[in-house]
Image (cartoon, helix red, strand yellow):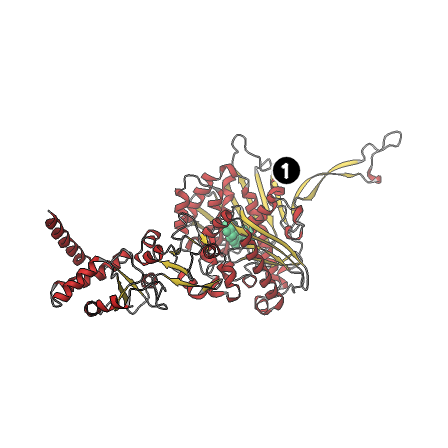
Amino acid sequence: MKQETHAFQTEVKQMLHLIIHSLYSNKEIFLRELISNASDAIDKLRFKSQTEPEILGKDTDFYIRIRPDKEKKTLVIEDNGIGMSFEEAVENLGTIAKSGTAGFMEALEATRKEGLLTPELIGQFGVGFYSSFIVAEKVVVESRAAGAEKGVRWESEGSGEYSVAEIEKEDRGTRITLFLKEGEEGDLSFTEEWTIKDIIKRHSDFIAYPILMETDSYEPVPEEEQEKDEEGKAKETMRKVRKDETLNSMKAIWARKKEDVKEEEYTEFYRHISKNWDEPADKLHLHLEGAVEYDVLLFIPSKAPFDLFQRDRRHGLHLYCKRVFVMDDCKELLPEYLGFIHGVVDAPDLDLNVSREILQQNSLVRNIRKNIVKRVFDLLSKMEEDAYLSFWKEFGPMLKAGIPTDFDNKEKIAGLLRYPTTKSGEKLKGLKEYVENMAEGQEAIYYLSGENLSALINSPHLEALKAKDYEVLLMTDPVDEWVVDSLREFEGKPLKSAEKGDLELEKPSEEVAESFKGLFEFIQKELDEDVKEVKASARLKESVACLSADAFAMSAFMEKVMQASGQEMPKQKRVLELNTAHPVLERLKERFTADPAAPSMKDWALMLFDLAVVSEGGRIENPSRFSRMVGELMAENLSGSR
Ligand SMILES: Nc1ncnc2c1ncn2[C@@H]1O[C@H](COP(=O)(O)OP(=O)(O)OP(=O)(O)O)[C@@H](O)[C@H]1O
């Protein structure tokens, strides 16, 4: 028989260390986690048996069993779910599934740095099984996968390594034996029946399979077995017996009436399905009737997981049919951009044997999806602003992606967008509020995108807009470019980039423009490689120069983002806008008129371009030339004024 010893993956070691040293005041959660895994294992088996009914065999009464032993100081958690093969035990119990994903180590590091390690922070890693080591000095897992001949025994003391061996195991499923640590003063005793009952009632009551434990109970002694006294009266009519007791009510929370469900029950259920350890930020519990009838219980997490944008991230929706689990990761019921929502949809009219392929074309599923998306928007739009802003901070970047991808709900999502603006200070503003506060005569919604807020707020592109007291939305997420491109307008007001196209503000007069014609042609020729046009600016008030683009061209920020992501990009020529009211331009015109061939003119042209790049927070191509020229100018100026 196979027998091996393996070292834990490094991340598991770190995780174990973290768990053991941070969760000592939350010891009891290990039981919730192990029961949750057992319940998942039964769900998985049922899902598989829809297409392979033979894997169930005769063992069709699903259960989770708890067996405490005070003498041996052990606690056993057993299930007849899908079980694990030798390879699966190594894969699942020696590594962390998410550890390979980008961001895992980063999140782990951040977690370690937080002075206070909360269970919520640790919970995001999906450490369920490893929480056994909070209470156990040794853990033994014996398992046999459904349909397999041989079983596996996995054993570890939670330090550096674990052993795995092939074993014979009679029944399908997983048995986990915890060899409990000596408790500290004041600790709960996890072999005590009432402690176990209490923990299960609080954390796992809704689990859909019976959680069984043998307990003492009393039953009437049958007539024929009764011992009688001289007068013929029974000595004892009741006797103590050991019997299985079901410790959970198994009531599907979503099928209960809202008013009957306590907040704590919702929270525990959320934790079970989401595998998160935080409190949900909000929830939606509905019973829908009409042409189709179904129950919906959805949760919005309070924190975004570190792998939110991971492509292969599982969706949080579970599909049930008449309280029987059909599938998890049900992507058909919610669009991708709402994939952060966790919950359950129970649709009694669905065929239990429905496959994913069928789901995609099912009109009932489409109907449900449409309706729940609508309800989610209602919920989000009615949230109190502060709570909504916390939500937006976590999930806004994902929600936004709905604008370019979900045409039907574009307007609704647009109402949920929030941005800092030139007038909002630290706060974020929605488009609705923006429109309500538009200045007299303002026709468009203005925005500017770029890498960071301080560069944006001081950008020369905003000078004329600020002078008119027009507010500008400030966008620092590259996705926003894509968002505004597909949104185009909100409540009939067009969205306009402050750095692109015609802002429809007062332009310098024809005569002024004409008087600079020669100079501008000269500058244009000098900068031909970078600049497609030089013109008198309507955007600038104080600065000398800025760069702008055509209304439909790519913005400087987008160009930068694309380059950073390694995309080959043809060089985009932009428009150099010059402030004709600025003294520099006036003097430059005089010099140019006096001597168009003066060698310094070329330097001035280059300098103007560099100034425009610097003022929008861009990188100039030849910084040493720029600094040399500024140095010379300073020297000249300083000596002149002395
Ligand atoms: N009772 C069980 N029966 C069968 N497989 C199990 C059982 N317990 C754990 N496993 C397997 O071990 C894996 C790891 O479990 P663990 O609780 O550490 O993480 P997880 O449940 O996958 O993570 P998360 O809690 O984020 O989902 C599970 O995904 C499952 O494949």
**Pointer 1 residue:** 193
Residue 303, relative to residue 334: is it above or below? above
The answer to whether the beta carbon of the residue marked 1 is less than 8 Å from any atom of ligand 1 is no
Residue 566, relative to residue 308: is it above or below? below
Residue 452 in percent (x, y) is at 34, 53
Is residue 154 visible to the viewer in this orientation of the structure?
A: no
- Please name the amino acid that badge 1 sits on: Glu
Is residue 227 visible to the viewer in this orientation of the structure?
A: yes
Q: Is residue 262 left or right of residue 608?
A: right
Front residue of 313 and 543 = 543
Front residue of 578 and 306 = 578
Residue 369 in percent (x, y) is at 58, 62
Q: Is residue 376 left or right of residue 534?
A: right
Residue 464 in percent (x, y) is at 33, 58
The crowding category of the residue bearing disc 1, from other C-alpha atoms within 10 Å (few below 14, some 14 to 19, many at least 20), is some
Front residue of 576 and 509 = 509
Label total for image: 1
Residue 639 in percent (x, y) is at 10, 49
Q: Is residue 104 left or right of residue 315?
A: left
Residue 49: quarter of image: bottom right
**Circle 1 SS class:** helix
Front residue of 594 and 368 = 594
Residue at the right extreme? 231
Q: Residue at x 44, y 42 (%)?
A: 18
